Image: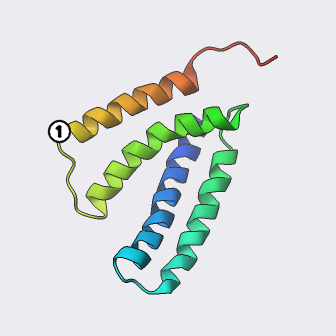
Amino acid sequence: MNSLLAFAGAAVLEIAGCFAFWSWLRLDKPALWLVPGIIALAGFAWLLTIADSPFAGRAYAAYGGIYIAAALIWGWMIEGHKPDTWDPTGAALCLAGMAVILFAPRSLPA
């Protein structure tokens, strides 16, 4: 469960940080938007390190499912872009993949 919370927090911070850069470059926001963007992206990177996984690549792969679902929610709640029928379907597939990666029984690494 710790990993899921870390991934959820990381997703919010990554999306917020990237959105700050997007806003600066695409929406003509002031360059000061980069300051919270950089802080958010640093927090995102830190949160990924506390996920309960012995391998970074596996943690990043599992995080991807959470990120995709969070990005769709962000688009809806922050940008006002309501998901269509296929968005939650795709997110559900990604979350199922995340669950397999994160929760599958495995033997200890050699």
- Tell me the quarter of the image containing the N terminus: top right
Q: Quadrant of residue 101?
A: top right
- Left or right of 31 on screen, residue 85: left
- Left or right of 108 on screen, residue 17: left
Q: Residue at x 46, y 59 (%)?
A: 15
Q: For the image shown, how many numbered marks are present on the structure?
A: 1
User: Along the line of sight, which residue is nearer the eye, 97 or 78?
Assistant: 97
Q: Quadrant of residue 75?
A: bottom left
SS class of the residue under badge 1?
A: loop
Q: Residue furthest left?
A: 85
Q: Estimate the x, y position of residue 32 in percent, counting from the top left.
A: 51, 85
Q: Estimate the x, y position of residue 36 in percent, counting from the top left.
A: 54, 74
Q: Residue at x 57, y 27 (%)?
A: 102
How packed mark 1 is, by other alpha carbons closer than 10 Å (few <14, some 14-19, many 20 or more), is few
Q: Residue furthest front?
A: 25
Does residue 90 sit above or below 33 in this rendering?
above
Does residue 97 sit above or below 44 in this rendering?
above
Q: Which residue is mark 1?
A: 85
- Tell me the quarter of the image containing the C terminus: top right
Q: Residue at x 59, y 70 (%)?
A: 38
Does residue 58 sit above or below 8 in this rendering?
above
Q: Estimate the x, y position of residue 62 in percent, counting from the top left.
A: 54, 34
Q: Estimate the x, y position of residue 76 in percent, counting from the top left.
A: 26, 56
Inspect the image, locate mark 1, and give the three-letter code of the amino acid beneath it: Thr
Q: Residue at x 67, y 54 (%)?
A: 46
Does residue 46 sit above or below 40 in this rendering?
above
